[in-house]
């Protein structure tokens, strides 16, 4: 896979990303600008033409939510988007979107301050004292990554009795790095603290002012066998004298019923596909018959047939021909399916597919109706709905049983967010699956080093010269193209891997046994950050090559004092690579996110694969915004900016980081407010992950600075940075004790009774602190209402397994969707009271595309 050590190619030249001159960064900037501007121009052209894609979320919002409509002008929508207030973000997109965008705003403010000091103070120091052709840390183990000839007289030699002399007095400018390491770390922690106070304050007011079924329900686990009944659980909770119980849903082993519903859905889709094929055959046959009839009439007119007996014979012939145009009359014209039967399923025959699937669907419906009447075994989990939010929160924040593992209370996700199949799964099985998948992800992340290194190696000039010498000679004559292969291509590879891998981790997280989609989303964020930070930064920072990572890791285990010095040396070598990486992610690829290039490219494919009305209906659904796909990369960029803020050329990374977060703020603000739906809801829980990952970045930053200063033999200054490490670790503990509980629950004092007039006046006074003066009063009411979901979406939801009450849908064959078969969902006229949307199918108008206003005709039913 890689050349041997005695090869003419150095292993680091093969794999390690290098930017040896300013021309490489200029080329990267030109390519990023070309990509970014082309995507932005295409988006500005398509946005007014495809509103069902680029304004899908806005069109489905309740009309009472006053989210301003954006102009259709080419660039006029940008200032209008900027003017959308935080209150409007809360009302239209919810708390998760608010937290996500608040992180971007915090990053912009923080890095603007850092960049100012990096340019005004640190850059002159670097130019005067450190801008020399020969680096001062060249004597720090140059053979660490290859030959075993190692003399570990690294940066800490003065403390180990080595030959290195302490030059702390000769290099007083190193105190500037110490001061700004403390200053930037303190500034980052202050920003986290300030933003956390603001988010918690708003979260408590946002969640404490509403009373949806989600906020009045808690999840009770560890229920003993003798208490596994709704009556006993209700009696137990009410004996605590905390409040009254409205309802209890005891989770039972509904696996058999859920499997029946799942099989019925597959069967229903097969039946609809058979009907679609049949109607297509009928349409084709009718068209052929119409053409043949017109030809026959023309021949009869030409031959001058009579108007009596001959005309009657022609009419009979046309009737017979029209009967032939009805495919359902003759066997073989309808779609067929092969069924196998007999011993070992060796015998087979073809039957009518529609009749076969209709009969199977009828029997399946009977089986489901019988299954719904059965009594299933109770599990140790129950969902208890209290009469008030305060009662529910008191139960959640208390321990109601002295025995370990018994009657544990936890918050409950929204009914639409609940994963019912995991509510009745055994806790031991779910825990085993969680640990197994976590271990698998760790192994997969480590193994991913090799394909990254392999792809990067094939784009290196040395490898090209070994296998394609003529092409390598041609590259030497064209420096721009050579720079692309040597410098730009590695960043493209890393960026593409960061886009593709999250889909794998998302699939694994959904099979980990979590009870809510919000928990799955937070898990995806954590897993993808681990992957991006490990493979994009840590591996290169430790070894500069993926292949040598494990050898270097073994040497670190033998001598841990090498860690700061070696990491500091390699981190500074990779500064231009990460500058190019952030530049590509922000300027080059961020506009492609708002363009939703994946949806645009895949739409024709999905449209071609769609055959049934249900397929076309699902095709028109807006894409889903998943924070686990976007937040990890933003966290990586944030940490890279902090790590490089004090180093050589750190101001460049800070500047491109500001551009990244500025473009990202506009991009994701548009996607969250206007374009995409958010099916998962974690009530702002992503802020915990953001803060803890920033703390990890701070620890790496401080470790790098210890090694960087020590590699310059300024050991006193290096030791002066060391206290920051335990202080940062203490802050993470402080954050977990002081702030984290308030990001999970609602404080009792934050819960307000809307019926109390005095409290209402107090609420209005408090809201003035977080609301804009020009925001309408109704939007301030919206701020005090909704929870994880908009209150409008949660209205009427209950904690009942959908398999028990879900109407058994009829086949969707024609243009209009079928009515629900139950009496409760229909009116006296027989039409659905739900106001089902009318879907316009492709055969109705061939000019319809992504952007036509053809999805939901009844605007009052947009959700």
Image (tube, rainbow, N blue to C red):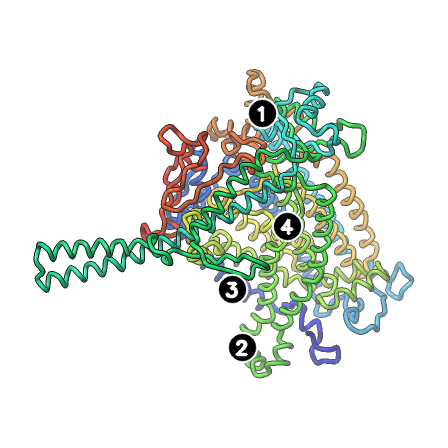
Q: Which residue is pictured at 66% across the width and 39% down the height?
A: 424
Q: Residue furthest right?
A: 161
Q: Is disc 3 surrounded by few (<14), some (14 to 19) or many (20+) residues within 10 Å?
A: some
Q: How many marks?
A: 4
Disc 1 target residue: 766
Q: Which residue is mark 2?
A: 478
- Give the foreground label among 4 and 3: 4
Q: Are marks 4 and 1 in contact (CB under 8 Å)?
A: no
- Give the alpha-carbon distance from disc 2 to disc 3, as whole Å: 16 Å
Residue 569 is left or right of residue 810, and the answer is right
Mark 2: give few (<14), some (14-19) or many (20+) Cα within 10 Å: few
Mark 4 → mark 2, Cα distance in angstroms: 37 Å
**Real-space Cα separation, disc 1 to disc 3, in angstroms:** 49 Å
Residue 118 location (% of width, % of height): 65, 53
Alpha-carbon neighbours of circle 4 within 10 Å: few (<14), some, or many (≥20)?
Answer: many
In this rendering, does residue 482 appear at all?
Answer: yes
Answer yes or no: do the residues labelled 1 and 2 have beta carbons within 8 Å?
no
**Residue bearing the label numbered 3:** 31
Q: Quadrant of residue 564?
A: bottom right
* Residue placed most toward the observer, 420 or 267: 267
Instruction: Return the disc, 2 or 3, that comes first in the chain's sequence.
Output: 3
Q: Which mark is residue 820?
A: none
């Amino acid at each position: 896979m890689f050349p041997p050590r005695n090869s003419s190619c150095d292993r680091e030249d093969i794999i390690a990303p290098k930017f040896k001159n300013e021309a490489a960064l200029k080329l990267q900037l030109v390519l990023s600008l070309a990509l970014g501007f082309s995507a932005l121009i295409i988006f500005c052209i398509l946005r007014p033409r495809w509103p069902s894609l680029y304004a899908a979320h806005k069109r489905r919002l309740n009309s009472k939510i006053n989210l301003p409509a954006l102009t259709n002008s080419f660039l006029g929508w940008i200032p209008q988007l900027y003017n959308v207030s935080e209150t409007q973000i809360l009302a239209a997109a919810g708390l998760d979107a608010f937290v996500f965008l608040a992180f971007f705003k915090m990053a912009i403010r923080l890095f603007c301050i850092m960049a100012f000091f990096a340019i005004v103070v640190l850059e002159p120091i670097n130019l005067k004292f450190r801008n020399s052709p020969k680096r001062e840390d060249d004597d720090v183990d140059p053979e660490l990554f290859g030959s075993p000839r190692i003399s570990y007289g690294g940066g800490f030699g003065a403390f180990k009795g080595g030959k290195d002399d302490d030059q702390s007095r000769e290099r007083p400018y190193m105190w500037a790095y110490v001061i700004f390491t403390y200053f930037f770390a303190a500034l980052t922690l202050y920003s986290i603290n300030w933003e956390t106070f603001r988010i918690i304050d708003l979260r408590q007011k946002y969640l404490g002012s509403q009373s949806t079924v989600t906020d009045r329900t808690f999840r009770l686990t560890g229920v003993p066998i003798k208490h596994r009944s709704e009556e006993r659980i209700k009696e137990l909770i009410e004996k605590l004298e905390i409040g009254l119980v409205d309802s209890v849903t005891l989770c039972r082993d509904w696996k058999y019923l859920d499997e029946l519903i799942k099989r019925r859905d597959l069967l229903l889709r097969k039946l609809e596909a058979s009907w679609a094929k049949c109607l297509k055959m009928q349409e084709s046959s009718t068209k052929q018959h119409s053409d043949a009839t017109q030809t026959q009439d023309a021949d009869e007119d030409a031959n001058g047939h009579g108007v009596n007996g001959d005309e009657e014979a022609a009419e009979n012939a046309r009737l017979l021909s029209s009967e032939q145009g009805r495919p359902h009359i003759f066997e073989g014209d309808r779609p067929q399916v092969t069924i196998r039967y007999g011993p070992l399923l060796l015998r087979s025959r073809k039957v009518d597919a529609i009749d076969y699937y209709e009969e199977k669907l009828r029997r399946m419906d009977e089986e489901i109706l019988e299954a719904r009447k059965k009594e299933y075994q109770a599990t140790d989990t129950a969902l208890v709905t209290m009469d008030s939010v305060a009662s529910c929160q008191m139960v959640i924040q208390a321990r109601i049983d002295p025995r370990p593992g018994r009657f544990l209370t936890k918050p409950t996700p929204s009914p639409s967010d609940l994963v019912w199949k995991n509510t009745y799964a055994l806790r031991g099985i779910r825990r085993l699956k969680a640990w197994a998948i976590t271990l698998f992800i760790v192994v997969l992340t480590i193994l991913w080093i090799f394909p990254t290194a392999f792809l990067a190696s094939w784009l290196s000039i040395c490898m090209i010269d070994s296998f394609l010498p003529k092409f390598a000679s041609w590259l030497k004559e064209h420096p721009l193209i050579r720079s692309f292969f040597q410098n730009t291509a590695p960043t493209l590879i890393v960026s593409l891997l960061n886009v593709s891998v999250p889909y794998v981790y998302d699939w694994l997280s959904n099979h980990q046994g979590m009870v809510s989609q919000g928990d799955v989303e937070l898990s995806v964020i954590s897993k993808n950050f681990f992957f991006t930070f490990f493979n994009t930064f840590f591996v290169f920072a430790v070894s500069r090559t993926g292949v040598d990572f494990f050898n270097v890791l073994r040497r670190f285990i033998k001598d841990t004092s090498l860690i700061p010095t070696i990491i500091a040396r390699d981190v500074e070598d990779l500064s231009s690579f990460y500058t190019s990486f952030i530049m590509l992610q922000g300027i080059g690829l961020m506009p492609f996110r708002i363009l939703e290039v994946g949806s645009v490219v895949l739409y024709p494919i999905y449209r071609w694969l769609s055959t049934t009305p249900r397929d076309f209906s699902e095709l028109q659904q807006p894409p889903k915004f998943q924070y686990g796909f976007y937040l990890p990369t933003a966290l990586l960029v944030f940490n890279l900016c902090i790590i490089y803020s004090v180093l050589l050329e750190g101001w460049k990374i800070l500047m491109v980081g500001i551009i990244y977060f500025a473009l990202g703020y506009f991009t994701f603000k548009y996607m969250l407010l206007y374009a995409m739906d958010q099916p998962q809801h974690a009530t702002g829980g992503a802020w915990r992950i953001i803060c803890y990952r920033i703390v990890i970045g701070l620890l790496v930053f401080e470790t790098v600075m210890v090694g960087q200063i020590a590699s310059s033999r300024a050991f006193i200054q290096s030791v002066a940075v060391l206290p920051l490490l335990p202080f940062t670790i203490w802050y993470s503990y402080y954050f977990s004790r002081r702030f984290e509980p308030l990001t999970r629950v609602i404080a009792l004092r934050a819960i307000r009774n809307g019926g109390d007039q005095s409290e209402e006046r107090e609420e209005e006074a408090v809201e003035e602190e977080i609301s804009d003066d020009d925001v309408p009063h109704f939007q301030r009411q919206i701020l005090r209402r909704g929870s994880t979901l908009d209150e409008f979406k949660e209205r009427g939801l209950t904690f009942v397994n959908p398999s028990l009450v879900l109407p058994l849908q009829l086949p969707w064959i024609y243009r209009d969707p079928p009515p629900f078969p139950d009496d409760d969902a229909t009116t006296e006229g027989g039409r659905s009271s739900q106001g089902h949307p009318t879907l316009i199918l492709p055969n109705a108008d061939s000019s319809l595309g992504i952007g036509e206003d053809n999805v939901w005709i009844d605007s009052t039913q947009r959700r």
